Amino acid sequence: MKKTTILSIAIVLIAMMGSCTSKSRAKANLKTDIDSLSYAYGANYTEGLIPYLEQMGVDSTQLKDFIKGWIEGASLKTDDKEMSAYLIGVDIGKMVGGEWFDGINQQIFGNDPANSLSKNNFMAGLLSRYSIKMLKWIFLLREDT
């Protein structure tokens, strides 16, 4: 009974999504009940995506790039620690070089377009506090406590 209910829900969701297909979307290969269930769950998990993208500053002109990144990100191995560390660095770098830097500039200079901090020098000062060797020591000290 439970399997039948889940399959019925999946079929209804697939039928609803069927009218929304386009050439730019990934093609589903629905040969088994598990394939259909996988598709239905994927379709269902998009709820809230548009407001999140808007919150993150992605607009309709950037959707092609977003989809490309989304597909590439989903294909990454979840156990690739080096890639995970790199992507975390990219996220933090965007935040520091964007929101933080802009906020500090705003606090110091207001809306004066003639004055601005140097982003290169700001980042150099920030990174001067953390060499790889120093960060390793910090991690080691935290592991001992």
Image (cartoon, rainbow, N blue to C red):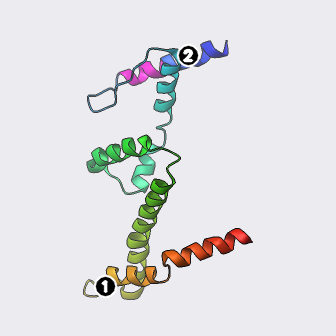
Most foreground residue, 23 or 92: 92
Q: Residue at x 53, y 47 (%)?
A: 79
Give 36 or 141, whichever is nearer the viewer: 141
Q: Secondary structure at mark 1?
A: loop
Q: Does residue 61 appear in this view?
A: yes
Q: Which residues are magenta?
A: 12-18
In percent of the image, x 52 and y 77: which residue is there? 133
> Which residue carries the number 2 mark?
7
Give the x, y percent position of residue 30: 43, 18
Three-letter code for the amino acid on which mark 1 is drawn: Ser
Tell me if residue 17 is in the magenta stretch: yes
Q: Residue furthest right?
A: 145
> Mark 1 or 2 closer to N-term?
2
Mark 2 secondary-structure assignment: helix
The quarter in which the C terminus is drawn is bottom right
Q: Looking at the picture, which amino acid does disc 2 mark?
A: Leu
For this view, does 20 lie left or right of residue 92?
Answer: left
Location of residue 96 (image quadrant):
bottom left
Q: Which residue is mark 1?
A: 116
Question: Could you say where residue 109 lies in the image, as x and y percent from the top left?
Answer: 36, 87
Name the residue at 40% across, 77% down. 101
Image x and y of residue 24, in percent: 27, 33
3D distance between C-alphas at marks 1 and 2 = 59 Å
Residue positioned 42% across, 68% down in the render? 93
Quadrant housing residue 5: top right
